[in-house]
Image (cartoon, helix red, strand yellow):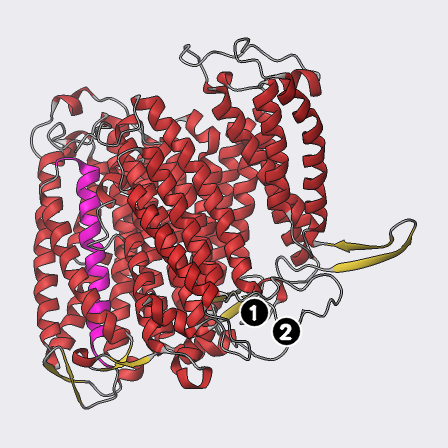
Amino acid sequence: MSNVVIAPMLVALVTAILTLVTRARPRLQRTVSLFGGGGYVVAVGVLTWRVFSGPVLTYQLSGWTAPYGITLVADQLAAFMLAMSAVVTIAALAFSTDYIEAFGQQIVYHPLFHLMVVGVTGAFLTGDIFNLFVWFEVMLMPSYVLVVFYSGPDHTRAALQYTVLNLIGSAVMLLAIGGIYATTGTLNMADLAVRLSNPEAFGITVGPVVGLAALLFAVFALKAGIVPFHFWVPSAYEAAPAPVSAMLAGVTKKVGVYAIIRLLFTVFGAAQLDLGPFGDGSMLLFFGPILLVMAIASAFLGGFGAVGQSNLDRLLAYSSIAQVGFIVLPLAIVATIPLTDGGTVAVLGGEFTVPTGAGTDGLRVLGIVAALLYALNHAVAKSLLFLVSGTINAAVGTIETDELGGLTRSRPYLSGAFLIGGLSLVGIPPLMGFFGKLTVFDTAATAMATNGTVGEIAAVTALGGAILTIAYVSKAWNDAFWGTESMAVVRATAQPLALLSIVVVLALVLVVLGIGLDPVYEGAHGAASAALDRGAYIDAVGPSYAEVQS
Amino acid sequence: MTENEPTVIARTVVRIVVPIILVTAITLLLQGHNAPGGGFIGGVLTAVAFALIYIIYGLDYFETEILGRTALPRALPGEPVEDETQQRPGVTKEFSEVLAIGLAIAAGGGIAAIALGYPFLSQAVAFVEGIPLFHEIEVASALVFDLGVYFVVVGGLLTIVAVVGAE
Amino acid sequence: MMGSVLAAGGEAGAYVPAREPQFVLAVVLGLLFALGTFLVLRRDIVRVVWGITILSQAANVYLVTMGGLAGSVPFVGHGDHGATATTDPLVQALVLTAIVIGFGTTAFALVLTYRVYEEHGTIDLTEIGDTHE
């Protein structure tokens, strides 16, 4: 039992309260907020370091033992995601102190921002599905307000759509959780995994759990913005102010991705069931083909959508849909492949030769590593691009690409930051994005080498998606940054130095992550292994059925 | 306001009902750690009592009559204002402070457990005996958290009522 | 799916819930979800908000149903009053949490509706244009 697990959440919570109390003094409020953000980064850093150098850490809230109490579990997957979100959070927070108008900041911006961070942290750490619902709500409620009240009258409808969709999503999630509790008799994720792997011993019918897991999956896909649950993304990202868009794309979207990895791979993957034409094995096989179709649709719909946009934020939002397709593509590939050590298996009509040693260091780990590396790249690069778009908005007053042009001449640093973010999305070495894309292709190629149709489909998708990425990044670059300077650019004299410096620092982070990939790769590898090591997860939580000790 | 003056019946009923609601709310708050009730429902009931006063006696009544302050003239909706807060009753500020204090109490209660070496949000209970009339009183630390929730709910709801009601 | 969930019937244990109250609740749930969905699809924002509220309340009723209702006491009171079988208390705790969250979101949605009305002078969704639609 170590307080280091709960420290990030408490730091963010205390900061939220302090910024609420200091509302009357804006300067103090901003200082407290920034220090709180710094404290959050430190707390996450310490937790990450402890988790990566030692065993999985757990924390029983109020001292109630699992599975009765709420457990927080900090394993390497959770720590990796937390570290990723901490980088985006501090950048977005620092950006907001200069970007959001002073009065807006004073009302509720800072408390809401930190509350959102509390929700995100809780969602990454919790080991209980109902608690996951609560943290989702804690994360979403501030985001509703941030999207709605800082967006201006033009975007009310988008904000309304975002709110209504997520509220319906919450109701559906509650339904799924209630059903899972009724069928399995537990809410604790580790306990759920234990029960699902021994259904007879606990008197569970696995059938209904598949449907309920699918409901949960749909909710996570909605949060992650995967096609066909993507339609709120463009308008909401366009409506929200730049730092909030950066948080939505860089952090809350990743919570959806994390929940998919955690629940499908660690928890529901434990269930064995007969799926008829899809094969016979883990519940993952049921979600594999679905996820694959969704990933392909996301990569293409998002990519084609982005090419046609003339508003920078909207282009980035469509690109987000495409990129999340890239993130879940490797997950989909490995989910369709049954985990058997060696031998051949039939999936989707294709014969698979499963590589030996797939249990620990095989295809599945590779797939999740690819998803995590790509997620990290997308989190940093996309929030960088949104912040660049915000800086352009602050400096020039517009982000419509037909009104921009020739930014490279007057604003070389800003353009350079955009170029780095864009190239990282495209996947040019030595930037972070190159390695993300490389591992995605590697996963597809490895699957293909084992004779699978899935591998081929995935490789074609990844290739098509990559070409589309090049198309929309170069379109944005040509329209907004190259060419002759437009009237708006010539007239703009504002030099938002503070904003610019944050953007430049974030761009450097992207370069550093790419050059110094080794520890990041190690981290992703550890996180992927943790996601698949169901036994270690269950042992760490240690659901005991003895008498409750209070 | 003069055209829609509430009837004497409404005014009298509110005078009688509001204290009863408040007592019920406090009872629910106090027993909430171990019986039906708690900070949330106590807070909602308290807010309902205040909402009744607002509806029947008007927005400024609370400030002028109970707190004994002079209500500042508020800008009417649609009138140009420098700052949105001018449209709200002055007491709104206190309400949102109540919310912040409540949050601080609730979180502080949880953190206090860590400071004492227990997990976050750990609770304890003590029985104090030999008190006249009650004989035995149950002192639960969960009450602190409930109290925090109570303030958050009261503060939050009344802020909404005051802000939306003023427009 | 509904049928199979009900057939599984709450916690596996010695206590077997009766089917009748759950059947009634299943019908009520169906009606609530139908009504909620119908309202969410309306153009009037106030109706949409009501629809969401009804949907989330329906989810709450569903949760309570999952605890297994069969006329046993909802909780064991102070002292020992001889109650032996209780309904699952956890679902009630869950519902309580969900109600509090639903309460907050409903309040927010109503404030949002008011703001929409203030800014656009209408609460008809089709009349509120968007810059790109």
Q: Which mark is residue A471?
A: none
A126 to the left or right of A329: right
Q: Are marks 1 and 2 on the same chain?
A: yes
Relative depth, front residue between C82 and A278: C82
Amino acid type at image mark 2:
Val
Q: Secondary structure at mark 1?
A: loop
Q: In this rendering, is residue B11 above or below A373?
A: above
Query: Where residue B108 appears, x then y in whole percent?
Result: 64, 48
Q: Residue at the location (41% across, 85% down)?
A: A200
Which residue is denoted by mark 2 in the rendering?
A: A548
Quadrant (top left/top right/bottom left/bottom right) for the C terminus of chain A? bottom right
Relative depth, front residue between A454 and A533: A454
Task: Please tell me in which quadrant of the rendered image residue A333 appears.
Answer: bottom left
**Whether residue A238 can be seen here:** yes
Q: Residue at the location (41% across, 34% down)?
A: C110
Q: What is the chain identity of the residue bearing mark 2? A: A
Quadrant (top left/top right/bottom left/bottom right) for the N terminus of chain A? bottom right
Amino acid type at image mark 1:
Tyr
Answer yes or no: do the residues labelled 1 and 2 have beta carbons within 8 Å? yes
Magenta extent? A310-338
> Which secondary structure type mostly characterizes the magenta part of the structure?
helix
